[in-house]
């Protein structure tokens, strides 16, 4: 392992990340190392880790290198690999801008969920093209304690179960994954969103993210919630020919989600870098032994 490893800390609507710039993919970030870095008491602390790698230097991203120079090698806070993180992509783009790799305007970022188009606005907000939602068939139910709700199965490159509830407190503490059925619906686990209405085109949510527990925000989750709310409300832009926009309040702030007639979804919100420094490599090596 290198004797000097830089890191930054950032967040998007308080969904926070450890950022490790590693253009040539030279840093060994084993699951135990990621979990140690994301530990909120013994490490830096974060819901996840953004490993910043040139696409050409990462075996999973090389096929996308012609479309996107940079690959977001995203890890959950427990060290497991995730397909996509919407808030993470915004913070990733903000880092690239800060480091001088990109400027304001449109850029492409490779992820395990495909190449994402990102727009960095002059006002500081970042908009991410999140792709299209898929709606896998089959009924799903999620539970907390003795309460159960039907949930909408939505896939945004990663799986979501969206349940509309009367009170967000009914979601409980969300420390452990809420039980769901049937088990075959999500063989690799699922992000579970609990949603209440705030007004026309306006909802609020809490979320349990796979591998992280309850987080202050989830970008793909906000997109899943917006399209699930639209379908519940009888709104389908593919049918009406008019974009549908929902404001989604998360514990850490607000995201604006727009689904176009072509099914493409855009998410707009803030992205902030709060600190940078250097890891103590001896500590990191001892943490993973």
Image (cartoon, rainbow, N blue to C red):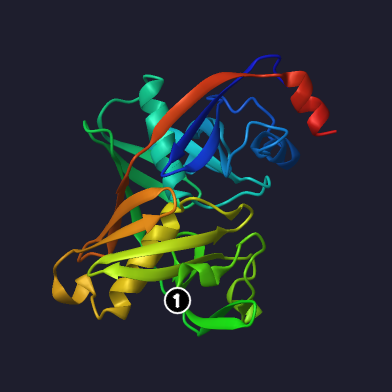
Observer able to see residue 53? yes
The N terminus appears in which quarter of the rendering?
Answer: top right
Residue 50 versus residue 273: which sits nearer the camera?
Answer: 273
Instruction: Please count the marks in the image.
Output: 1
Percent x, y of residue 252 = 43, 48
Q: Which residue is mark 1?
A: 165
Mark 1: secondary structure: loop
Percent x, y of residue 39 = 68, 39
72 left or right of 43 in image:
left
Q: In the image, what residue occupies the spot 49% across and 39% down?
A: 72
Residue 131 versus residue 65: which sits nearer the camera?
Answer: 131
3 left or right of 111 in image:
right
The quadrant where residue 79 appears: top right
The quadrant where residue 68 appears: top left
Q: Is residue 123 above or below residue 143?
A: above
The C terminus appears in which quarter of the rendering?
Answer: top right
Percent x, y of residue 102 = 33, 25
Q: Is residue 85 above or below residue 223?
A: above
Residue at the extreme right: 289
Observer able to see residue 65? no
Q: In the image, what residue occupies the spot 43% across and 28% down?
A: 273
Residue 74 versus residue 19: which sits nearer the camera?
Answer: 19
Q: In the image, what residue occupies the spot 23% across and 76% down?
A: 235
170 left or right of 267 in image:
right
Percent x, y of residue 240 = 15, 75
Q: In the image, what residue occupies the spot 44% across and 33% down?
A: 70
Q: Residues within 10 Å of mark 1 (few under 14, many from 20)?
A: some
């Amino acid at each position: 392992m290198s004797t000097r490893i830089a890191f930054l800390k950032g967040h998007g609507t308080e969904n926070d990340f450890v950022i490790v710039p590693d253009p040539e993919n030279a840093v060994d970030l084993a699951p135990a190392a990621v979990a140690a870095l994301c530990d909120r008491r013994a490490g830096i602390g974060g819901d996840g880790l953004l490993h910043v790698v040139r696409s050409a230097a990462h075996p999973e991203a090389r096929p996308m290198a012609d479309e996107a120079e940079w690959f977001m090698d995203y890890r959950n806070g427990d060290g497991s690999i995730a397909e996509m993180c919407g808030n993470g992509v915004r913070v990733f783009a903000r880092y690239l801008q800060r480091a001088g790799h990109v400027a304001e305007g449109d850029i492409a970022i490779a992820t395990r969920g495909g190449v994402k188009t990102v727009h960095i606005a002059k006002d500081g907000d970042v908009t991410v093209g999140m792709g299209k939602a898929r709606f896998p068939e089959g009924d799903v139910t999620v539970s907390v304690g003795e309460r159960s709700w039907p949930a909408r199965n939505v896939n945004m490159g990663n799986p979501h179960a969206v349940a509309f509830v009367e009170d967000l407190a009914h979601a409980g503490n969300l420390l452990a994954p809420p039980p769901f059925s049937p088990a075959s619906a999500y063989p690799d686990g699922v992000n579970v969103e609990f949603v209440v209405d705030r007004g026309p085109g306006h909802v609020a949510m809490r979320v349990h993210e796979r591998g992280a527990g309850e987080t202050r925000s989830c970008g793909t989750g906000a997109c899943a919630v917006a399209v699930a709310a639209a379908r519940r409300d009888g709104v389908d832009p593919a049918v009406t020919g008019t974009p549908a926009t929902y404001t989604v309040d998360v514990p850490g702030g607000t995201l604006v989600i727009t689904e176009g007639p072509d099914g493409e979804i855009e998410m707009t919100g803030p992205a902030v870098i709060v600190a940078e420094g250097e890891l103590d490599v001896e500590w990191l090596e001892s943490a993973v032994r």
